[in-house]
Image (tube, rainbow, N blue to C red):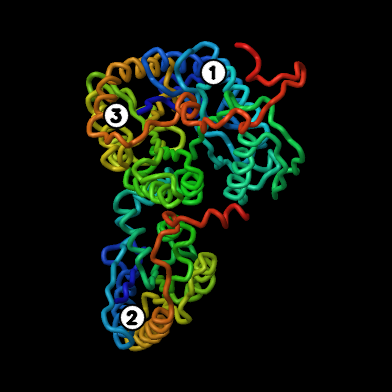
């Protein structure tokens, strides 16, 4: 049983980030099912958590909905993260979400990155903005990410090829990984080890 | 069950008047509040420790010593004592003296402190927070328990032939709680030594508090101190009450909305739902507080945060009057269904009674270096 979490940070309804995210999720499920059947996907639409995330950043108190999202992330074998490009980078709510997670939560948890924007000029946003964030979080990043500009939605063939290639690479990474699903917060360390320093 | 209050010692403007009390006013207010706490029948007064504005309690034993002189029954404690940046030798000395002056009415709660710059101001590094808490406390325990300490560690200069003066009152070290919101290492530390574990229970929902407490309870049993339900647990909590619950909400809201730490965040209603904060009538505070037992099991100490966020002294004293009114019901409620084997929080008297009563020669003999006599040989 493989569990994927799709995180999308678009603000429109429907948003192109959501559209891209769902395509990436479908393709990833198909690719994973060919390796080990039984993949489920939980979709976190960050727009619905925007106020909770702002409050959490002020108080560190997670709302029930945000806590549920964090719990879903902890149970993920892989994460598909898709954001629109605002001012050359990921959106504020996208950063707030990954800032809200426990520092170690993304460690060792495979990530497939996607981004959407109005023009092809933002194509390198995955490389210059998203990859550094997930490297910092110590998440293994799937070697193929997908950027979709508005014009790509009228050019389905090639976008689909890139989605398939990204999903295949991500599936290989997920099936080879076993990220921790236990919160470090409630694990008792060995005190004798702590005493030894 | 011990019931009491704990104070951060913040100096915050009253948002309804814009007036900021002086440090002098706030320090004296802490004394007034502690005396009032004893007067209404509370068991514990605990002060925070901070080394930066806008807080005043940088010297907790000075404050607690002054309060000890003006009270006779209430236990004086801390919330928390910074085990990371204080020298454990100085903690041992200061609290030994306080213990003698207060006739044993003293315990401590250890905490790490989360203000980054305080660490370098005291020659430490916040990244060493956990190792400092582990090493310093291990030394503190020895200082209180062993006559002559030879010690070497990673952080402090070594000790050769060090004897703490004064020895703890009656040779009984103060009971220690370890406070932590989310560090399993600290729950483990409390469990390892069979010390108390305190969860501040203010900023998080009760299910989080429950999981931390359960971790401590399981490890307490694992380390052989007794069944999990006999572990020594303390909780924080906060309320604001008026006889009419809508009055409580209306009066507290301007303080809540801009309060340090959680102000500018969720609404009062959302925060009251998500965390143990109760704003309402005395009956609502009573019921909410008694519900904590359902989450964490029967526990030993409940401390409330009342004096904070710019609330005027007069208001805080009124809150204490109202708390005094529901105190008998709180005590009755906590006693209800409490199994006989669940212990009370240790006190100086109970620890003294439980001390191994071997022959006197087995206990360290302390000689007064002026009279050359042991305290045991001096007629009272």
Q: CA distance from mark 1 to mark 3?
A: 37 Å
Q: CA distance from mark 2 to mark 1?
A: 69 Å
Residue B323 drawn at (x, y percent): 32, 20
Label disc, if present, on residue B103 of the rendered structure: 1
Marks 2 and 3: which is nearer the front? 3
Which residue: 26% across, 40% down? B294
Could you say which is closer to the camera, residue B269 or residue B86? Answer: B86
Could you say which is closer to the camera, residue B109 or residue B341? Answer: B341
Marks 1 and 3: which is nearer the front? 1
Q: Quadrant of residue A86?
A: bottom left
Helix, strand or loop status at disc 1:
loop
**Callout count:** 3
Residue B292 drawn at (x, y percent): 29, 37
**Callouts 2 and 1 on one subunit:** no
Give the class, few, some or many, for how many residues have Cα within 10 Å of label 1's Cα (few <14, many ≥20).
some
Marks 2 and 1: which is nearer the front? 1
Q: CA distance from mark 2 to mark 3?
A: 49 Å
Asked whether the viewer can see residue B96, the reply is yes
Which residue: 57% across, 49% down? B130
Residue for badge 3:
B279
Give the class, few, some or many, for how many residues have Cα within 10 Å of label 2's Cα (few <14, many ≥20).
many
The N terminus of chain A - image quarter:
bottom left
**Callouts 2 and 3 on one subunit:** no
Which one is earlier in the sequence, the residue at label 1 or at label 3?
1
The C terminus of chain A - image quarter:
bottom right
Can you say whether A119 is above or below B182 in the image? Answer: below
Helix, strand or loop status at disc 2:
helix
Residue for badge 2:
A28
Which residue: 71% across, 24% down? B367
Residue B187 drawn at (x, y percent): 46, 47
Can you say whether B16 is above or below B340 in the image? Answer: above
Q: Quadrant of residue B253?
A: top left
């Amino acid at each position: 049983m493989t569990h994927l979490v799709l995180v999308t940070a678009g603000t429109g309804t429907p948003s192109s980030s959501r559209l891209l995210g769902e395509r990436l999720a479908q393709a990833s499920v198909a690719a994973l099912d060919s390796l080990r059947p039984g993949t489920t996907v939980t979709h976190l639409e960050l727009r619905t958590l925007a106020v909770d995330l702002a409050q959490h950043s002020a108080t560190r108190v997670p709302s029930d909905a945000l806590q549920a999202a964090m719990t879903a992330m902890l149970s993920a074998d892989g994460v598909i993260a898709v954001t629109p490009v605002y001012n050359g980078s990921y959106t504020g709510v996208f950063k707030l979400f990954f800032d809200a997670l426990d520092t170690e939560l993304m460690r060792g948890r495979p990530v497939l990155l996607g981004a959407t924007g109005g023009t092809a000029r933002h194509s390198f946003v995955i490389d210059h903005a998203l990859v550094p964030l997930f490297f910092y979080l110590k998440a293994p990043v799937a070697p193929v990410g997908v950027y979709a500009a508005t014009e790509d939605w009228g050019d389905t063939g090639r976008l689909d090829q890139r989605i398939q290639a990204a999903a295949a690479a991500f599936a290989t990474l997920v099936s080879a990984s076993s990220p921790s699903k236990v919160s470090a917060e409630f694990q008792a360390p060995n005190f004798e080890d702590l005493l030894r320093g | 069950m011990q019931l009491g209050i704990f104070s951060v010692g913040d100096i915050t403007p009253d948002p309804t008047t814009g007036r900021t009390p002086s440090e002098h006013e706030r320090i004296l207010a802490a004394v007034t509040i502690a005396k009032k706490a004893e007067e209404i029948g509370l068991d514990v007064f605990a002060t925070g420790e901070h080394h930066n504005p806008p807080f005043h309690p940088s010297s907790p034993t000075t404050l607690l010593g002054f309060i000890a002189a003006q009270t006779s029954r209430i236990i004086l404690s801390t919330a928390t004592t910074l085990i990371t940046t204080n020298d454990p030798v100085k903690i041992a000395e200061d609290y030994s003296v306080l213990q003698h002056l207060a006739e044993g009415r003293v315990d401590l709660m250890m905490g790490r402190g989360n203000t980054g710059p305080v660490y370098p101001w005291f020659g430490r590094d916040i990244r060493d927070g956990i190792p400092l808490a582990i090493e310093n406390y291990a030394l503190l325990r020895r200082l209180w328990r062993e006559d002559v300490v030879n010690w070497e560690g990673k952080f402090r200069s070594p000790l050769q032939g060090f004897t703490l003066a004064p020895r703890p009152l009656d040779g009984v070290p103060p009971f220690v709680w370890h406070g932590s919101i989310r560090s399993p290492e600290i729950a483990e530390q409390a469990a390892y030594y069979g010390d108390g574990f305190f969860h501040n229970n203010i900023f998080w929902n009760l299910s989080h508090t429950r999981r931390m407490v359960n971790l401590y309870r399981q490890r307490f049993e694992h380390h052989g101190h007794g069944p999990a339900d006999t572990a020594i647990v303390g909780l924080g909590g906060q309320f604001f009450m008026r006889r009419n619950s809508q009055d409580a909400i209306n009066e507290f809201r301007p303080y809540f909305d801009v309060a340090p730490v959680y102000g500018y965040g969720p609404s009062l209603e959302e925060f009251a739902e998500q965390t143990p904060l109760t704003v309402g009538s005395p009956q609502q505070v009573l019921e909410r507080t008694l519900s904590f037992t359902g989450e964490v099991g029967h526990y030993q100490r409940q401390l409330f945060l009342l004096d904070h966020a710019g609330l005027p002294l007069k208001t805080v004293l009124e809150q204490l009057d109202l708390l005094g009114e529901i105190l008998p019901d709180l005590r009755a409620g906590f006693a209800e269904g409490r199994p006989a084997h669940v212990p009370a929080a240790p006190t100086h008297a109970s620890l003294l009674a439980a001390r191994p009563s071997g022959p006197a020669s087995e206990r360290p003999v302390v000689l007064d270096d002026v009279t050359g006599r042991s305290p045991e040989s001096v007629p009272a």
